[in-house]
Amino acid sequence: MHSSELSHSIIPLPKTPIILGNSYTIYDGLYEPQQLKVAIKQLRVLGGDGAYTQQAREPRNQRIEKEVRLRSSLTHENILPLYEKIEAMGEFYLVSPWMEYRDLSRFLSARREHSGLPPPHDHLIPNALQAAYSDFNEPNTIHGIASGLAYLHAHSVVHGDIKGENILLDPSLKPLISDFGLTKSEAVDATATSMGSGAPRWTSPELTDSDQPQKTTKSDIYALGMTIVEVIRCLSRLL
């Protein structure tokens, strides 16, 4: 990825991708002149042979346009902001704030791992991370996720893939729901191709038992419950 592919206001940092997913690649970059660090999410769709195809691009582009319009219309303190969408060289890039602590699952796993380091080995953990692990508040995190999801549902948006990996943590450890916006309807075809797919542990029973599963606000609530369990299980292992 070169700076010429992006908006003149963004400078990609000279690094390899931070995250490489099945349908996206995430880089970090800087907004100028504020020097604000941002995440640059490059979206892609592969054909059946693993190649980029025009047939795959067209419906993909329609989904992205729909997601961008939706995300731009929603504002909540527990929803990840979208700064802008950039289309260049046939590819789409979504620009959002950079989250140093990444996602909730990664944070909880690292916190659990580092909590087992006794003195003097605990000095290996950077002071900033030690403070973050200590300051992390489980009830506030759960409340924030639930609040953000309630906001989506109040605007007739089904997330469809609520889990720790799709909850980002800002510098103050406030949870921000990400990777939503494929539909405004109350039901989403659970078998349809999308930018994200549900993980088994967070998938409600009716989605696995039905021949024509539809993701709904109810299946979102089930996934929220499993995400809460994820947080509580980490807490119980620290006690």
Image (cartoon, rainbow, N blue to C red):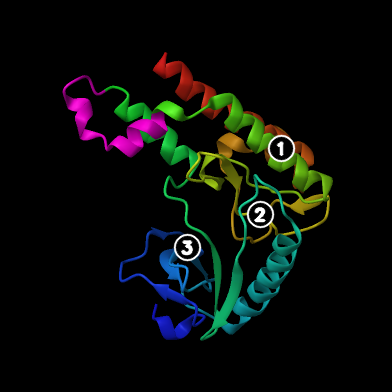
CA distance separating discs 2 and 1: 15 Å
**Quadrant assignment for the N terminus:** bottom left
Q: Secondary structure at mark 3?
A: strand
Residue marked by disc 1: 147
CA distance separating discs 1 and 3: 24 Å
Residue marked by disc 3: 38
Question: Residue placed at 60% from the left, 66% from the top?
Answer: 83
Question: Residue placed at 50% from the left, 65% from the top?
Answer: 41
Question: Residue placed at 69% from the left, 42% from the top?
Answer: 148
Q: Is residue 9 visible?
A: yes
Amino acid type at circle 3 is Val
> Which x, y percent locates residue 39?
47, 62
Region of the chain picked out in magenta, as a range: 117-133
The quadrant holding residue 228 is top right
Tell me how many marks there are.
3
Residue marked by disc 2: 180
Point out the frontmost of discs 2 and 1: 1
The quadrant holding residue 226 is top right
**Is residue 45 shown in magenta?**
no
Mark found first going from the N terminus, 2 or 1: 1
Q: Secondary structure at mark 1?
A: helix
